[in-house]
Image (spheres, helix red, strand yellow):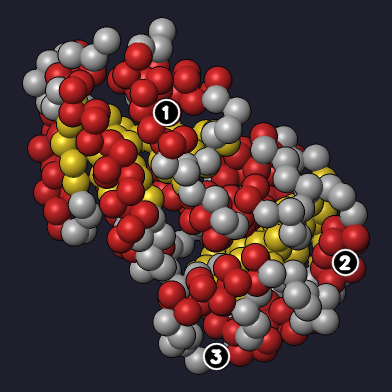
Amino acid sequence: MAKDIDRRIIQDLLDNGVDFVTSVPCKQLAGVIEVLDETEALKHVPCNKEDEGMGLCAGAFMGGMKPAIIMQNTALGVTLNSLATLIQFYQIPLPMLISYRGEVGEPVACQVEMALHTKALLAQLNIPTYHLHHASQVEELPGILKHCQMCSKPVAILTDASFWGSAT
Amino acid sequence: MIRYELLELLKETLTNELVVCNIGSPSQELHAIDDQPSNFYMLGTMGLCSSIGLGLAMATDKKVVAIDGDGSVLTNMGTLATIGNNHQKNFILVIVDNGSYGSTGDQPTYTGGRTSLAKVAEACGCDTVVECSAADTPDAVKAALAGDEMTVIISKCDSGNRKCPVITMNPIMIRERFMAEVAR
């Protein structure tokens, strides 16, 4: 069941020109994906793996669209080569809305293992990273999306359990 | 017939169509045979040629031809399910199937064994799948370009590469001149 925060996030994407979204689902992102599928102005193409999704985004960008990817942090590892040799090498702006599993409030111990590596991997790749820890911080999203387009880089927006738990 | 000879044959068919070309030897050979702004060369990122092509086809009305390989598709097999469930009439996927990882020394892939990418593509929901010899591939591509159906062409080639220079063009240059062609 989608919440106001999910609708707000999708509206922010729309307001900032995003018109193509690929995704691999996460429980925390289910509401966002639900609203996405109700939003005709956003083309949603689910992918099977996040690096495949980055290929779709690169193609859509070269066709004149503004892509974004919705994914879970545990998948960051499979995207490293695509980020370095495609998205960064060809300077493609790509907002990555990432559920930050494995943070405080996480019920599944295994999720913590990739949470421990998430920021280190993003830092190693020099990817601008924004960690949203409380629902009120969603107000930063429009600025982040503009920044992404301005610098033509992938940017990571990490949304943890506290962010989603404090959302209405 | 090896991939290089196939690409030479395709030169007169692919004049100003948008072409997304697989990493390594395929891009180097295409670049040596017929460098054009309408070619997007992958300089890295094994496996994503078909995905880039599909994403591009979704964003433009122009015909998009992705020249991929069997090893590359095997590494990103989920792409065929995405393609099969998101038919783009302007998208043609040519899988040069030489049963080997050409760029890395012609090590065998499983398509030279028991695996049929044509059957995988069909099972993934691709309606128009053509498996043909390399010699028959230009006609298959011409038919697909003339038609109005998303087409997956599996072109059975011999294993082997022609030594061509590494592409030294700046990636931003490759992308920007390609995007100018898309927007033209």
Q: Which residue is mark 1?
A: A10
Position of residue B1 measured from the top left corner of the image (x, y, whole percent): 75, 79
> Residue B163 or A13: which is nearer the viewer?
A13
Q: Position of residue A132 (x, y in %)?
A: 17, 31
- Residue corresponding to mark 2: B142
**What kind of element bears circle 1?**
helix
Q: Which quadrant would residue A164 be assigned to in this image? A: top left
Answer whether labels 2 and 1 touch (C-beta < 8 Å): no
Tell me the CA gap for discs 3 and 1.
Answer: 47 Å
The amino acid on which the numbered mark 2 sits, given as a three-letter code, is Lys
What kind of element bears circle 2?
A: helix
Sooner in the amino-acid sequence: mark 3 or mark 2 = 2
Give how far across and how far down residue A54 sits, in percent. 44, 50
Q: What chain does badge 2 belong to?
A: B
Is any part of residue B41 visible from this angle?
A: no
Quarter of image, res A143: top left
Q: Residue at (84%, 71%) from the top-left corner? A: B138
Mark 2, mark 1: which one is toward the viewer?
A: 1
The residue where tag 3 is placed is: B164
Q: Chain of mark 1?
A: A
Work out which quarter of the rendered image holds the C terminus of chain B and state it. bottom right
Chain of the residue that carries numbered disc 3 in the rendered image:
B
